[in-house]
Amino acid sequence: MMKDSPRRKIVDAIDFMTGDKNEPQIVEINIEKIVEFSDHPFHLYEGKRLDDMVESIKRNGVLSPVIVRTISSGKYEMLAGHNRMNAAKIANIDKIPALIKENLSDEEAYIYVIETNLMQRSFGDLYPSEKAVILEMQYDKVSSQGKRNDIISELKALEQGADLESVEPSTDSRERLAKEYGFSGRTVARLLRLNKLTSDWKVQVDNEVIALMTGVELSYLPESLQSHLYNECSDMHIKISLKDAQMLKERHQAKALSKNELSKLLIEKEKSKLKNKDFQSIKVSKEIVSKYFDETTSKKEMESIIVLALQKYFTDQEG
């Protein structure tokens, strides 16, 4: 794989963004000395995309340097290049080229993580939880600007003796983001709520195991209840519907949802499904019946023998 110009532009853009006028030096770093970014919000490549990257690195090595920051003596934190590092590990490569950034604040480091991902992928290609992270960062930035504008409007109103309640906020952060990304304000609000989900439920939304709106409703539960719910659903093989999520949210808001109460609700949900489910009848061919039973065997005797046979079969399977 040839070293492409867009990757070079990524490095240039990042340096311009942080005001680094000097060309950073590329050095070889042992992968064992690099730790992943804390709470890295983006999914690593899987499947064919990962396989292709691994094969390319096996043939050509890591051509585009990763970006790291120094966190302690001899240790570095990955900012841009998690997929390259992961593929290099799979390809049994010990060292990768890296640009080392010094004295970065946590906020500056986070900008590197977010912006480099956006430079390489379009917003539409991101998972819902990844979009949520981007929007939250943008929302905070826009909201801060909006607050500054609102304060200015308020001060002007005070100088002119105007009624403060009549002063409209100058910035609607949510609507500004909606316009920028081509969403409705409601969609932006829903995506922002996903940041309140635990990581397990975010994966469920990203993999479309549960619907986006179901995740939004679950986000109103505290983390402890979300974690308990996830574990219970995994153990009982239960899929949460939007209606279930809305009910749990309402119970929580009414202060009537503890972990025990949540578990009881799930058990009742499963019981009701069993009650409402019609029994399934199975027809056995005449050939099979005549092979194992004669005409004198009653239906009740046949059922008893079949039950015993099934019990023995499943006992043998477990053994």
Image: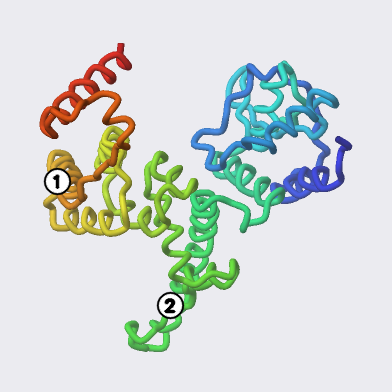
> Residue extending furthest front?
295
* The N terminus sits in image quarter: top right
Picture residue at 57% right of the left edge, 43% below the top: 110
Picture residue at 42% right of the left edge, 53% below the top: 194
Report the disc number at residue 107: none
Return the residue at label 1. Answer: 268
Q: Please, what is the three-letter code of the amino acid marked with disc 2?
A: Pro
For residue 215, above or below residue 172: above
| Mark 2 Cα shell of 10 Å, populated few (<14), some (14-19), many (≥20) | few
Picture residue at 61% right of the left edge, 42% below the top: 113
Nearest to N terminus: mark 2 or mark 1: 2
Return the residue at label 2. Answer: 169
Question: Judging from the image, what secondary structure is the residue with disc 2 in?
Answer: loop
Q: Within the image, what quadrant is residue 57 found in? A: top right
For residue 145, above or below residue 3: below
For residue 299, above or below residue 226: above
Q: Please, what is the three-letter code of the amino acid marked with disc 1?
A: Glu
Picture residue at 87% right of the left edge, 38% below the top: 3
Residue 106 percent coordinates (x, y): 54, 39
| Mark 1 Cα shell of 10 Å, populated few (<14), some (14-19), many (≥20) | few
* The C terminus sits in image quarter: top left
